[in-house]
Amino acid sequence: MLAFNASAVVDKNFDYHVDRFADIEVLRYEVPEFDRLSLNQKKMVYYLSQAAQYGRDIIWDQNGKYNLQIRKLLENIFNSYKGDKNSKEFKAFEKYLKQVWFGNGIHHHYSTDKFLPEFSQEFFTAQVAALPDSMLPLKAGQTREDLLSTLIPVIFDPSVMPKRVNQDGSVDVVATSASNLYGDGVTQAEVEAYYAALKNPNDSTPISYGLNAKVVKEDGKIKEEPYHLNGLYGPAIAKIIYWLDMAKSVAENDAQKAYITKLIDYYITGDLRLFDEYSILWAEDTASDVDFVNGFIESYGDPLGMTGSWESYVNFKNKEASSRTETISSNAQWFEDNSPIDPRFRKPEVKGVSAKVINAAMLAGDAFPSTAIGINLPNADWIRAAHGSKSVTIENITEAYDMASHGNGFNEEFVIDAPTRKLLEDYLYITDMLHTDLHECLGHASGQLLPGVDPDGLKENGSALEEARADLFALYYLADPKLIELGILDNPEAYKAEYYKYMLNGLMTQLNRIEPGKNIEEAHMRNRQLIAAWILDKGKKDKVVEVVKKNGKTYVKINDYKKMRTLIGNLLAEIQRIKSEGDYKGGADLINKYAVKVDPKLHKEVLDRFSKLDIPPYRGFINPVYEPVYDDKGNITDVKIKHGENYTQQMMRLSQDYTTLPF
C-alpha cells in the first residue's frame, strides 16, 4: 500500500473540538509540516490567507441582500447586551447568531432553508431599541423604524425568503430563490433567454457565462452587473488584489507569478477570457508547493448553476501522501480508456490531469466554516479537455473529521453486523480517501461533451448529476484490480468498505441532515440518494442490495458486491450519456424519480436512532491564525501559527478586521 499515513504527523493531544450548537459542531484542524516551509513559503501562506479573509463579505452578500446588515446588527446586540446572559431568550439569540455565522447568512449552509429564531420578536425589538444610533447598521436614508420594518419579516416570517437556493424544476427557480445573485423581478425565463442570445453553440472555447455577475433588470431590460475592481464588490476585491500582489512578490517560480498576475488582471477587469487564461496557467503549474484557489468558482449557490460563489483555499503539498494521487493521475488514460461508458463520450487523449494531497492552511468564503474534502478545477469542460485539470485531496481536514469521530457509536448503531463493522474499521479510511482521490482527480476530469452541447444544458439538475458522475466513476474503479496492481490497495476486498458505507449513507444515514417533512435539496445529497436508490431498484430482482429489518431496526444489506459494481457501471454510462448529449429531460427524470423524495417512516427511524448517539449532522472549522514576526526594520523574519481562538472570538475578529463592503 502506498504511503498515506497522515496520522504519523498528527498531535494526539491536539484539541479538535471547539463548539457545538443546533445541528452543528465546530472543529479546528492542524496544519502539519507548516514549519518545514521556507520563509518565503510561509510569507506566501500568510499573504494568501489575508487575501482569502478579505473576501468574506462577498459570500455573505451573494447569499442574501440583507445578510451584511443583519450580521452587523446581531453582533452589535451581542456585544452590548446588558441583561442576563443565561436567560432563555439570550441563549436562543446566541444560538441564532452562531447559526448565521456558520451559514454565511440567514440560510442553512447545506439545506439552504432559512433559520427560524427561537427568541421572540419582542426580545429582538427591545434589543434594537436599546442600541444607540451609532450602532445601527442603517442604509442611506433609513431610520430605526425602517430598519425594523424591513428586517423583522426577513428574520421571523417563515414565508419571506424561505430558501436560498430552490431546485424545484416545476417552478421558477430564480424567482423563488432568496440568494442575491439575481435582482428583484428577474425571472428564470429572462435569464435563460439572455444567456442563450449570448452563447454561440459553435464556440469550442466558451467563457463561463454568468460566472462573475449579478443579473438585474433595469428599465425592463436584463443586464449583467459584473464583479470586478470598479464594479460590484470593488472594495473587497481591492483588498484581495493587494494581498495577491504581495503573494506574487514571493512566488516560488515564474509559472506561479504568471498566474497570480493573470488572476489580478481578471479581478481588475472582470474579463472572463482572462479568467480562462488564469485557469489554464494555474492548472498547468504542478511544481509549486504552496497553492491556492481564490475567486468566483463553484456554482452550487445558483439555482441555474452558472454564477460562482466566492471562495478561497490556501494550502501546501503533503508530499508523503501525494504518492498515491500521483500514481492515479499518471494512469489517467488507462482509467479513461477502460471506463464503462459509450466510447463516443470518452476523451481520446486525457491531458494534464495532475493530483496531489494537500494540507489546508486557510479556508474562506464559501469554503468556510463548512468545507469540501477534495477539489477538482478548473470547471470549464473545454479547459479540462485541452489543458487538463488539477485535483487535490485535503488530508488534514479529513484527518480532523476522523479524529473527532472516534468512539461515537455510529457503526454499532447502523452497520448490520460485526464482520461488516470490522471491514469498515480496517479499510474505510483508506477507501474513503481513495474515493475522494478518484472522484476529484479522474471523475470530474473524465468524459467529454458532444460538439455543440451547452455545458449549462442540464440547468438546475446539472450540479447533482455532475457529482453523481464523479462519484460513480470513483466507486466503479475502487473495485478494479488496477488499484492492487498499482500498489494503492493491498486487499482486493477493501473496496467493499466504501460500497457499504456509500449505500448506507445514500439510503439511510444522510437523512439525519433533513428536517421532518422536507425533501432532499442539496446537490451532493441528491447525488448520493440517486445512486443508492437506483442501485437498490435495479438490483432488486437479484437482491443485490436489500433494506432489511433486524431486531426491529432497519439495516442495509449488500448480498452481491460484484453485481453492485456492474450496476454502478451501468448508471455511470447513462449519466455520462445525459451529460454528453445535454439530455435535460433524461437527467430531470432520474433526479425526480430517485434523488428527491424521502420515506417519512424511515426518516423518523433514522432521526430517532441518531438522537440517542448525539452525533451532529454537520461539522465545520475555524481557521488557525498566522502571525508574522518582524525585525526592527519591519521585515518579516518568520510566521507563527496559533490555534487559541474559540468560535465566537474568531467570528467577531473577522467582522472587526475584514469588513470591506457597505450594508
Image (cartoon, rainbow, N blue to C red):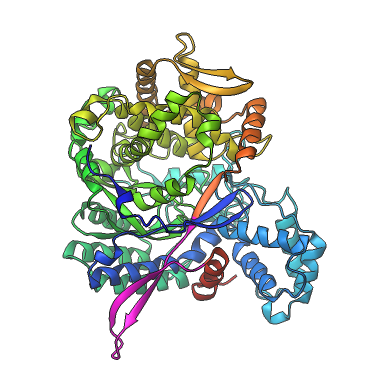
In the rendering, at what x and y percent does residue 627 appear?
38, 75
Residue 606 found in image quarter: top right
Q: Please tell me which residue lies in front, 536 or 199.
A: 536
Which image quarter holds the N terminus?
Answer: top left
Which SS type dominates the magenta stretch?
strand
Q: Does the magenta stretch include residue 478?
A: no
Is residue 97 placed above or below 421 in the rendered structure?
below
In the displayed structure image, the side of residue 379 where residue 556 appears, left or right? right
Residue placed at 35% from the left, 33% from the top? Answer: 427
Q: State which quarter of the image contains the C terminus.
A: bottom right
The residue lying at 39 percent from left, 49 percent from top is: 399
Which residue: 77% across, 72% down?
A: 83
Q: In this view, does 507 lie to the left or right of 561?
A: right
What stretch of residues is rendered in magenta?
621-645
Q: Residue 538 in the image: state x and y as whole percent.
A: 46, 15
Residue 453, position as x, y percentages in the image: 35, 34
Q: Would residue 52 be seen by someone viewing this image from the given angle?
A: yes
Whether residue 585 can be seen here:
no
User: Is residue 633 within the magenta segment?
Assistant: yes
